C-alpha cells in the first residue's frame, strides 16, 4: 500500500470510522469490537457483509486489514487506554504479522489486563471465545502469539487453547511441570506411608 493510500485511509470517513468512534465512546460494548472486521455491510438492509479473515484472496484480505489499521491509527492517538480499540489494534496487528509493533502486543495485553480486572466473568468468557474464534484464520505463529497473550492473564486456558488450535507442543513445559509436581506429591505420600508403617 502506498503512502498516499495510507494517508487517504487515515482521513477517510467510512462505516468503519463510525464503528471506531462508537467504540471510542462506548469501550465496553465488546460485541461491536468484532463487527469492525466485516466489510460491505449494509446497515439499512441489515446485511452483515464479509468477514475479513475469511477473504480467500490473500492480497485483498491484507489490504482490508491495512485499511482498518490506518483508519484505527487516528483513534489510537486520542484514545490511548480504550480497551476496545486496544483489542482491535492487537487483532489487526496479529493479522498483518506485525504483532510486536507498539500498537500490537502491548495494546492487546493492556486490553486483556483491563478485561481480567474490570469486566464481569460471563462477559470475559464470551470475549475470550470470540478472540479464540478470531484466531482460527491466523498463521500458526500468530496463533501462538494469541495463545501466549491470553494465557498471560488466563493461565488455566493453556490446555484448551493448545487443543483448539492443535498446538500441543505449547503444553510441553506445562506437562513437565505437572509431572514434576506429581512426582513430588508421590514422594511425600510414600514418606508419610513409611512413617505410618513404622509407628
Image (tube, rainbow, N blue to C red):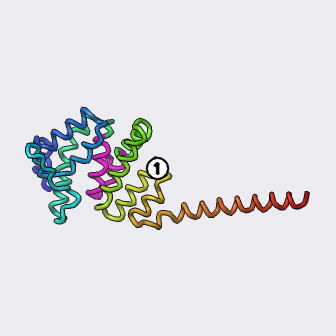
Q: Who's the residue at 10% across and 50% down the image?
A: 4
User: In the figure, 169 relative to 121: above or below?
Assistant: below
Residue at image position (42%, 51%) is: 150
Q: Is residue 8 left or right of residue 164?
A: left
- Identify which residue is drawn at 50% across, 52% down: 156
**Can you identify the residue that label 1 sits on?**
152
Q: Residue 87: horizontal and vertical position, in percent?
A: 32, 45
Residue sitting at the far left: 44
Q: Nearer the viewer, residue 38 or 65?
A: 38
The stretch in magenta equals: 84-106
Quadrant where the C terminus is found in the figure? bottom right
Crowd rating for badge 1 (residues with CA inside 10 Å; few <14, some 14–19, many 20+): some
Along the line of sight, the residue nearer the viewer: 119 or 17: 119
Is residue 164 positioned above or below 14 on the image?
below
Q: Quadrant of residue 118?
A: top left
Q: Observer-nearest residue: 161 or 46? A: 46
Main SS, magenta residues:
helix
Image-quadrant location for residue 81? top left
The residue tagged with tag 1: helix, strand or loop? helix
Q: Position of residue 141 (x, y in %)?
A: 36, 63
Q: Residue at x 36, y 60 (%)?
A: 143
Relative image position of residue 20 (x, y in whole percent): 21, 40
Q: Is residue 49 magenta?
A: no
**Extreme residue in the right direction:** 199
Amino acid at each position: 500500500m502506498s503512502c498516499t493510500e495510507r494517508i487517504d485511509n487515515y482521513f477517510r470517513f467510512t462505516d468503519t470510522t463510525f464503528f471506531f468512534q462508537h467504540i471510542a465512546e462506548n469501550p465496553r460494548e465488546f460485541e461491536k469490537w468484532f463487527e469492525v472486521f466485516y466489510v460491505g455491510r449494509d446497515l439499512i438492509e441489515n446485511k452483515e457483509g464479509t468477514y475479513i479473515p475469511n477473504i480467500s484472496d490473500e492480497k485483498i484480505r491484507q489490504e482490508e486489514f491495512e485499511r482498518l489499521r490506518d483508519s484505527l491509527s487516528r483513534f489510537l492517538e486520542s484514545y490511548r487506554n480504550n480497551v476496545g480499540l486496544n483489542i482491535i489494534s492487537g487483532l489487526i496487528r496479529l493479522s498483518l504479522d506485525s504483532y510486536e509493533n507498539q500498537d500490537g502486543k502491548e495494546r492487546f495485553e493492556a486490553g486483556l489486563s483491563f478485561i481480567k480486572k474490570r469486566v464481569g466473568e460471563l462477559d470475559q468468557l464470551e470475549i475470550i471465545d470470540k478472540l479464540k474464534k478470531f484466531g482460527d484464520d491466523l498463521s500458526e505463529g500468530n496463533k501462538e502469539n494469541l495463545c501466549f497473550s491470553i494465557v498471560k492473564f488466563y493461565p488455566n486456558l493453556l490446555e484448551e487453547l493448545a487443543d483448539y488450535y492443535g498446538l500441543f507442543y505449547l503444553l510441553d513445559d506445562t506437562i513437565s511441570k505437572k509431572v514434576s509436581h506429581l512426582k513430588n506429591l508421590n514422594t511425600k505420600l510414600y514418606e508419610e506411608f513409611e512413617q505410618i508403617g513404622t509407628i
